[in-house]
Image (cartoon, coloured by chain):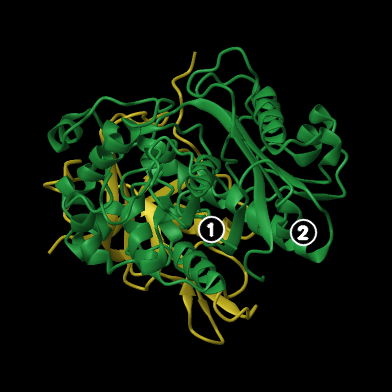
């Protein structure tokens, strides 16, 4: 794909984030979509392309009253929206549609109108993982951590510092769920969830949603907001069974999607002003920094513990507070994208001054999938 | 009301031989006749070279502890926390999720790379799960 040919011209989250007991999951989609359409200064009838995950495109399109000529229901977990951005950019460039709306919403906490997630007993996961006591992401996602720590000499304190640094960012963000400062000791004394991870190393569980609107870069100049260009994109999948990853020392999906996006954007790591790495759990930023090639994996724990990713640090990372402190409705990728767009527009609560290039890296499932988007505000 | 039960696997045509094996006290893997790749979970073709000529064989049942978590909460139905959910690397190469028995479920007792051997735990008259215990010297 050619760089900077497609732009984000509308971006918004749901009116409220956190606990939203007065909206179903489907209405959260609509709330986010209507906010993004207003942000772009468009009418519903202007939307001719649509993408969403978990809920079907037909469900959300009919509820909103959208009549699309292009749809994408790619649903590979929390990074589905990164893949939607990549697919939408290609579709717009190919002339399949002009204006794409991407929505995410999840009633993750209140569970209103939320589709059940279950593992069929005759699926591969149902036969070869579920019988051993896996029960939700906290029991599965951290399974690679102990191997990763042993291979690279990462310490428990370094993994705790991920949560501490992200809380510093969250403190600057009025919409963040958790803003109270915490220490490494607080993290290491919080309730044990699944050793080696404790409560403060696991993502929040909240309600919310978000939506993006993309169109061609040529049209983007006529919109009310500063366009944010899609500079590079990458995607991949590996396995829906965490036990079957090629190795626990890295993520094959990360190592495929990330470099693809950097190559397409034509950038080097030193060009990155702002970085989002989907942090459902505290180890993900370490995997991400290593697999995206910012540094050898051995250095990732020390890099974060030394304060390089905190406010004022040389590589601002997860500047909304992340899934650990901002919000996490279940598929957090959309919120990472929203923060990258805010940073590129120059309107983030914890704005990185002069930021021109933002990399937004997502994970789906338990290292099952990955999507990476490079944004820029210069064409 | 009945006690909540541990999740029970339901075999498919492609995995039946594996579950027949555990019931007979064997851990069965598959090897590609064309490229010799050994793989898991079961399927009637080689995921490395796509050959449909594959053979089942009895694995040694030996392996080592590749990684794990000790799950505290929430606990899966039929499990009493804390309990370890482990990934074992088999001597033949593939890895599989399992539980570690005859061993305290603590970070001190569960050392990465410790040698393990397979054991079999019957859930009912149809399904027997492969689990692992520290290997005898």
- The residue mark sitting in front, 2 or 1, is 1
Whether residue B103 is visible: yes
Q: Position of residue A145 (x, y in %)?
A: 29, 52
What is the drawing colour of chain A? green
Crowd tier of the residue under label 2, counting other residues whose Cα lies within 10 Å: few below 14, some 14–19, many 20 or above: many
Q: Residue at x 58, y 34 (%)?
A: A117
- Write down the residue under mark 2: A92
> Residue shown at 78%/33% (left/top)?
A59
Residue B25 visible? The answer is no
Q: Which mark is residue B90?
A: none
Is A376 placed above or below B75 here? below
* N-term mark: 2 or 1: 2
Residue labelled with disc 1: A376
Quadrant containing the N terminus of chain A in the rendered view: bottom right
Do the numbered discs 2 and 1 sit on residues whose CB atoms are within 8 Å?
no
Secondary structure under the numbered disc 1 in the rendered image: strand
Decide which of A338, B36 is in the foreground and name it.
Answer: A338
The location of residue B116, given as percent across then percent down, is: 24, 60
């Amino acid at each position: 794909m050619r760089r900077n040919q497609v732009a984000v011209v509308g971006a918004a989250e749901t009116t409220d984030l956190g606990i939203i007991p007065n909206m179903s999951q489907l209405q959260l989609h609509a709330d986010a979509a209507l906010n993004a359409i207003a942000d772009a200064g468009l009418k519903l009838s202007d939307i001719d392309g649509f993408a969403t995950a978990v809920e079907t495109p037909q469900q959300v399109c009919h509820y909103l009253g959208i009549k699309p000529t292009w749809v994408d229901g790619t649903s590979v977990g929390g990074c589905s929206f990164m893949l939607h951005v990549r697919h939408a950019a290609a579709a717009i460039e190919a002339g399949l549609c002009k204006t794409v709306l991407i929505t995410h919403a999840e009633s993750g906490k209140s569970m209103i109108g939320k589709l059940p997630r279950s593992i069929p007993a005759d699926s591969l996961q149902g036969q070869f993982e579920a019988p051993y006591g896996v029960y939700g992401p906290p029991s599965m996602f951290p399974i690679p951590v102990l191997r990763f720590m042993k291979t690279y000499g990462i310490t428990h304190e370094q993994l705790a510092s991920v949560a501490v640094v992200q809380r510093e960012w969250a403190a600057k963000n009025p919409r963040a769920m958790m803003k109270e400062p915490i220490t490494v000791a607080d993290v290491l004394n919080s309730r044990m969830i699944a050793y080696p991870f404790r409560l403060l190393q696991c993502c929040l569980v909240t309600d919310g949603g978000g939506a993006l609107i993309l169109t061609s870069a040529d049209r983007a100049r006529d919109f009310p907001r500063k366009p944010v260009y899609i500079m590079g994109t990458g995607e991949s999948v590996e396995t829906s069974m965490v036990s079957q990853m090629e190795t626990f020392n890295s993520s094959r999906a990360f190592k495929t999607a990330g470099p693809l996006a950097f190559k397409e954007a034509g950038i080097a790591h030193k060009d990155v002003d702002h970085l989002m790495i989907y942090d459902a759990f505290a180890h993900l930023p370490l995997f991400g920094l290593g697999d995206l090639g910012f540094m050898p994996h051995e250095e990732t724990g020390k890099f974060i513990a030394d304060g390089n990713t905190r406010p004022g640090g040389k590589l601002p990372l997860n500047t909304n507070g992340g899934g650990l402190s901002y919000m996490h409705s279940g598929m957090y990728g959309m919120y990472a994208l929203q923060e990258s767009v805010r940073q590129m527009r120059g309107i983030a609560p914890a704005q990185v001054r002069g930021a021109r290039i933002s990399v937004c890296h997502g994970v789906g499932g338990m290292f099952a999938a990955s999507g990476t988007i490079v944004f820029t505000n210069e064409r | 009301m009945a006690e909540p039960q541990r999740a029970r696997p339901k075999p498919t045509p492609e995995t039946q031989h594996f579950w027949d094996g555990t019931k007979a006290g064997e851990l069965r893997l598959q090897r590609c006749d064309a490229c010799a790749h050994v793989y898991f979970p079961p399927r009637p073709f080689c995921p490395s070279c796509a050959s449909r000529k594959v053979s089942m064989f009895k694995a040694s049942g030996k392996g080592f502890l590749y990684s794990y978590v000790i799950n505290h909460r929430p606990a899966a139905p039929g499990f009493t926390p804390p309990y370890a959910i482990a990934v074992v690397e088999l001597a033949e190469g593939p890895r599989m999720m399992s539980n570690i028995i005859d061993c305290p479920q603590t970070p001190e007792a569960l050392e990465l790379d410790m040698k393990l051997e397979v054991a079999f735990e019957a859930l009912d008259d149809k399904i027997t799960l492969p689990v692992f215990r520290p290997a005898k010297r």
